């Protein structure tokens, strides 16, 4: 019989997908300490770490059972990424990150800068930037164009007007609607942003 520690992760994953339940136990035991330590280093609470650890493997099992795993033998980095995302979810859901106040004066980009980021906040900040980029891609093309020119390229509305061939008022209107739509998308996707 081949010893468990000689079997590669990719073979164990294939075996588990093929119906060998014991293969998952081997994978969990093999990576338990490293994954647990990673989660604990972020959360600093034994019981919450155990919850996130269990949630990680519940998500792993669901993904494998659905046949959505395609990491080509990179099982541990994939599991660590799932745990990383669940840690971020934990901080968001437990109000360790304050949510924004939804007012007419709300500026989505005012929440993105924090000069003194610790490790926890850097992880969260990175996720927020990714969330905002995805939301921007959901905007109608003309709104996305104006928003990118104004906020990322630091163009004036006069320059935007000249580059897009629309009036300054139209450019202003598109910018206003892009921010309104971003607010709606934030609510729709239940995204919480750092103040």
Image (cartoon, helix red, strand yellow):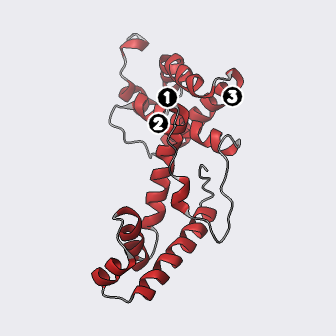
Q: Where does the image place residue 35, in percent across and percent down from the top left?
A: 52, 23
Nearer to us of marks 2 and 1 is 2
Q: Which residue is mark 2?
A: 81
Compared to residue 47, the image places residue 67 above or below, namely: below
Counting residues from the start of the chain, the first of labels 2 and 3 encountered is: 3
Q: Does the residue at mark 3 contact the one at mark 1 (Cβ under 8 Å)?
A: no
Asked whether, in this view, residue 53 is left or right of residue 75, the answer is right
Count of number-bearing discs: 3
Q: Which residue is mark 1?
A: 20
Q: CA distance from mark 2 to mark 1?
A: 24 Å
Q: Which residue is mark 3?
A: 48
At numbered mark 1, what does the secondary structure look like: helix, strand or loop? loop
At numbered mark 2, what does the secondary structure look like: helix, strand or loop? helix
Q: Where does the image place residue 104, in percent across and percent down from the top left?
A: 65, 72
- Nearer to me, 92 or 67: 92
Counting residues from the start of the chain, the first of labels 3 and 1 encountered is: 1
Q: Does the residue at mark 2 contact the one at mark 3 (Cβ under 8 Å)?
A: no
- Nearer to me, 190 or 181: 181
Nearer to us of marks 3 and 1 is 3
């Amino acid at each position: 019989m081949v010893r468990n520690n000689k079997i590669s992760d990719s073979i164990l994953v294939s075996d588990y997908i093929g119906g060998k339940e014991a293969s998952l136990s081997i994978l969990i035991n093999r990576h338990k300490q490293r994954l647990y330590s990673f989660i604990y280093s972020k959360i600093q609470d034994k019981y919450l770490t155990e919850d996130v650890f269990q949630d990680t493997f519940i998500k792993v099992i669901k993904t494998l059972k659905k046949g959505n795993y395609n990491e080509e033998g990179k099982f541990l980095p994939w599991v660590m990424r799932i745990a990383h995302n669940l840690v971020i979810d934990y901080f968001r859901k437990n109000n360790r990150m304050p949510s924004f106040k939804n007012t007419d004066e709300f500026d989505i980009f005012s929440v993105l800068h924090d000069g003194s980021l610790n490790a926890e906040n850097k992880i969260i900040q990175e996720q927020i930037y990714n969330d905002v980029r995805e939301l921007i891609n959901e905007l109608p093309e003309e709104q996305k164009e104006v928003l990118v020119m104004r906020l990322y390229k630091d163009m004036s509305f006069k320059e935007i007007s000249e580059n897009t061939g629309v009036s300054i008022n139209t450019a202003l209107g598109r910018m206003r609607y892009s921010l309104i739509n971003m607010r709606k998308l934030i609510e729709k996707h239940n995204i919480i942003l750092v103040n």
